[in-house]
């Protein structure tokens, strides 16, 4: 493992993860490690960051590690990457509203809080505390899908048993309606195929594609089409 400072680091499921950092200049290499007897570490190599950077913020939720902002060889960045510790793969997420370095981040409930750091003025720290919803991995936010007036709603919400999901489409086309948990895991695909313009009704009975019951908690129904991407938060109470 090469020496570095200001890296992105997190611990998930008793494993330490380290991405990028500063070694005179920003670097991209990444590693994971498990603790062995005698306080030694067993290191492994991970896929590196697509853009070398360090001195940003790291947060985690479930099996996901969020790598936020930092400084690159070209200056501060608003880049936001997600590393899935189960699949060992990265996914780009929608960039943050402004480039930021030297900040802290934490996840709480279903949100990411980004705290302090430096924005456009590298000589003046900011006191800003910003809150963002946790991204839903699997819907490929990097595709930058355009937004139309497609809508999705559901009732009752919270629900116990079955929820009715209503979709309103301004035009016909291929659509996918999928249920995710807050860790980005796909639970159930309710529809994949063509839908005409107008209203369409679907039901979710709190089961996954294999018929296993879902636990009580918060889920997200995602409607994805060629010209739209919509999310609707669901609360399931047994």
Image (cartoon, rainbow, N blue to C red):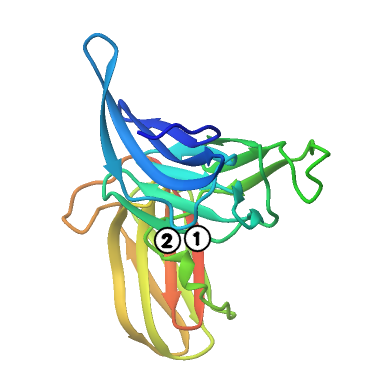
Q: Nearer the viewer, residue 56 or 182?
A: 56
Which of the marked residues, 1 or 2, is nearer the chain's N terminus? 2
- Residue position for label 1: 232
Q: Residue shown at 51%/40% (left/top)?
A: 21
In the picture, the disc for residue 221 is 2
State whether residue 206 is above or below residue 153: above
Q: Position of residue 180 (x, y in %)?
A: 37, 55
Q: Nearer the viewer, residue 169 or 18?
A: 18
Q: Are marks 1 and 2 in contact (CB under 8 Å)?
A: yes
Q: Residues within 10 Å of mark 1 (few under 14, many from 20)?
A: some
Q: Secondary structure at mark 1?
A: strand
State whether residue 192 is above or below residue 88: below
In the picture, the disc for residue 1 is none
Q: Is residue 67 left or right of residue 103?
A: left
State whether residue 79 is above or below residue 169: above
Residue at the left extreme of this rendering: 210
State the CA–CA distance, disc 1 to disc 2: 5 Å
Q: Residues within 10 Å of mark 2 (few under 14, many from 20)?
A: many
Q: Quadrant of residue 203?
A: bottom left
Q: Residue shown at 65%/44% (left/top)?
A: 131
Q: Residue shown at 50%/83% (left/top)?
A: 227
Instruction: Identify the image quadrant of the N terminus.
Output: top left
């Amino acid at each position: 493992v090469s020496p570095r400072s200001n890296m992105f680091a997190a611990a998930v499921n008793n494993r330490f993860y380290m991405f990028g950092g500063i070694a005179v200049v920003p670097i991209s290499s990444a590693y994971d490690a498990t603790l062995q007897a005698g306080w030694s570490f067993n290191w492994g190599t991970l896929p590196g960051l697509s853009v070398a950077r360090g001195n940003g913020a790291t947060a985690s939720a479930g099996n996901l590690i969020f790598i936020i902002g930092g400084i690159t060889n070209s200056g501060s960045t608003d880049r936001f990457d997600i590393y899935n510790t189960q699949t060992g793969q990265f996914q780009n997420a929608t960039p943050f509203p402004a480039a930021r370095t030297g900040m802290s981040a934490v996840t709480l409930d279903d949100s990411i809080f980004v705290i302090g750091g430096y924005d456009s003025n590298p000589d003046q720290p900011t006191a800003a505390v910003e809150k963002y919803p946790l991204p839903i991995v699997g819907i490929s936010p990097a595709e930058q899908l355009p937004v139309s007036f497609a809508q999705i709603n559901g009732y009752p919400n919270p629900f116990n048993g079955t929820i009715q999901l209503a979709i309103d489409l301004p035009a016909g086309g291929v659509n996918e309606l999928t249920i995710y948990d807050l860790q980005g895991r796909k639970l159930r695909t309710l529809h994949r195929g063509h839908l005409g313009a107008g209203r369409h009704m679907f039901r979710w009975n709190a089961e996954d594609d294999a018929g296993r019951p879902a636990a009580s908690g918060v889920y997200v129904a995602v409607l994805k089409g060629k010209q739209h991407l919509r999310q609707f938060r669901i609360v399931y109470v047994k």
